[in-house]
Image (cartoon, rainbow, N blue to C red):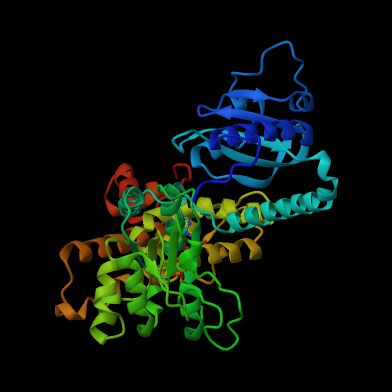
Amino acid sequence: MARQVPAGLSSDAEVRSLAASSLVKLFDSLYEGAVVIDQAGRITWINDKYKALIGWNGSEAIEGRLIEDVLPNSRLRHVVETGHADLLDVLTVGGRQMVVSRIPLHGEAGNVIGALGVILYDRLQALRPIVSKFQQMQTDLATVRKQLASGRQAKYRISQFVGASRLAAETKEQARRAAEREGAVLLLGETGTGKELLAHAIHAASRRAEGPLVSINAAAIPEALLEAELFGVEPGAYTGAGTKSRSGKFLLADGGTLFLDEVGDMPLALQPKLLRVLQEGEVEPVGGNQLRAVNVRVIAATSRDLKAMIEAGSFRADLYYRLNVLPIRLPPLRERSEDVSMLCETLLEQIAEQGGEASRTLAADGLARLAAYGWPGNVRELRNVLEQAVAQSDNRRLAGADFPMLPEVVEVIQRLVDAEPDTVNSGVRPLREAVAVAERAEILRALEATGWVKLHAARLLGISRAQLYEKLAILGIVSEEADT
Ligand SMILES: Nc1ncnc2c1ncn2[C@@H]1O[C@H](COP(=O)(O)OP(=O)(O)OP(=O)(O)O)[C@@H](O)[C@H]1O
Ligand SMILES: [Mg+2]
């Protein structure tokens, strides 16, 4: 069937060209401003109203300049790059909000050769209430986003893991290496050894630091809710699930890190689903049948013996191997008692800062009492003990007597000497360990006997003062006190 061309018009091309020139005239008269850029983002045409609006004084040519040089907020280049029109948007020009439209311009071959931007501002006064509402919502959104982001940022850096002992240095080195890699991290250690601290620090040192850090504690959430918390919920998944979908922690952590604390408490029934996310990188919300791809790195932590749990059938071996890609063991404080002094210094500073008073220090016998103790609650317990001592004592230098909650050094010595050797090994303990225990006990006994005058203690022990200092450092009974 022949095309119907209205009278006076001869061809398709003519129709199009006439339509185009009419539209340009229309834009010129109808809108507050109109601008055209080419493929390279250079202004090829701009009307006088637009020039007036941006205060262009006319002395220099505006054509040929990059659009961003003239309008820093412009999104016209984006339209050229994507080929997608923005039919309604708000652009800020010189502090004024304008309603704008952006349309890609196509060449003969259908390729994008430029873009047209028009300002609809003055003709559409009626939009003002909508624009101001939009602005308010943008401001609110920015505030909420900021709040959310600050809750999803790392609170610690690797440098904040205090300790110079060999074990602490090794732990920090492992954390640095884990930060450079992408596999799952498994933090293993007793309560209070710094697992949470290290999880934050690894995220902060990793390529994902700009992404979110989301935490979830498997032991703190009732089993019935844990699945929804982790994987999210689709509308109407269960009675009371509501009509909106809710993102799970995995989705919230997309592009970042999920800290899965107390992973040993993960219910057996949920473990296969967790394994699937780790293997496939896909989550399946509760009540949904669609999988969603996520890009999340998992850092898991536990104080439980996962291997024993596998034996007992309460933890899946396949999940364990998936989590155990980069295992890091956090040493208990009693294995690195030479760090007690340094830790006390940092913790006492933190405590002083909180209380708004000058930092306390430790006297030699105070430090000895702390270093001799076994610290089942590790750094957390050390912090609590220091807090109590600061609250209960007025001494600027905390002495042994300021720690009545801890066993006396002599009691510790007795315990060390009496310690039941490892019965598994038929009463025999490694010679090195036995010697270290005896040495430590003897040194502490000498110090007690001489009132902590190290010169006298060294003489009693038949070693030089320098040798005594060396041993004190190794045994963790160091002090910053002047030579006594
Ligand atoms: N090496 C360290 N240097 C400085 N502070 C530390 C260190 N290790 C732990 N802490 C502090 O001790 C407290 C307990 O640490 P954290 O919460 O990381 O331990 P955790 O291993 O997660 O314990 P739990 O298993 O009980 O959850 C925190 O206040 C933390 O800042
Ligand atoms: Mg913890």
Residue at screen point 51% across, 76% down: 233
- Specify whether residue 394 is in view: yes
- Tell which residue pokes out farthest to the top in this image: 59
Instruction: Name above or below for residue 118 compared with residue 437.
Output: above
> Which is more toward the observer, 241 or 468?
241
Provide residue 350's location: percent of width, then percent of height. Answer: 58, 53
- Image quadrant for the C terminus? top left
Residue at screen point 79% across, 40% down: 121
Instruction: Name above or below for residue 428 compared with residue 181.
Output: below
The number of numbered badges drawn on the structure is: 0
Residue 74 picture quarter: top right
Provide residue 60's location: percent of width, then percent of height. Answer: 69, 12
> Which is more toward the observer, 100 or 294?
100
- Left or right: where 191 falls relative to 10: left
Residue 444 picture quarter: bottom left
Instruction: Name above or below for residue 10 compared with residue 205.
Output: above
Residue 189 picture quarter: bottom left
> Which is more toward the observer, 267 or 358?
267
- Left or right: where 131 falls relative to 203: right
Provide residue 122's location: percent of width, then percent of height. Answer: 83, 39
- Specify whether residue 73 is in view: no
- Left or right: where 298 falls relative to 437: right
Residue at screen point 46% across, 75% down: 285
- Left or right: where 346 falls relative to 440: right
Residue at screen point 54% across, 45% down: 84
- Tell which residue pokes out farthest to the bottom in this image: 239
Provide residue 427's location: percent of width, then percent of height. Answer: 17, 78
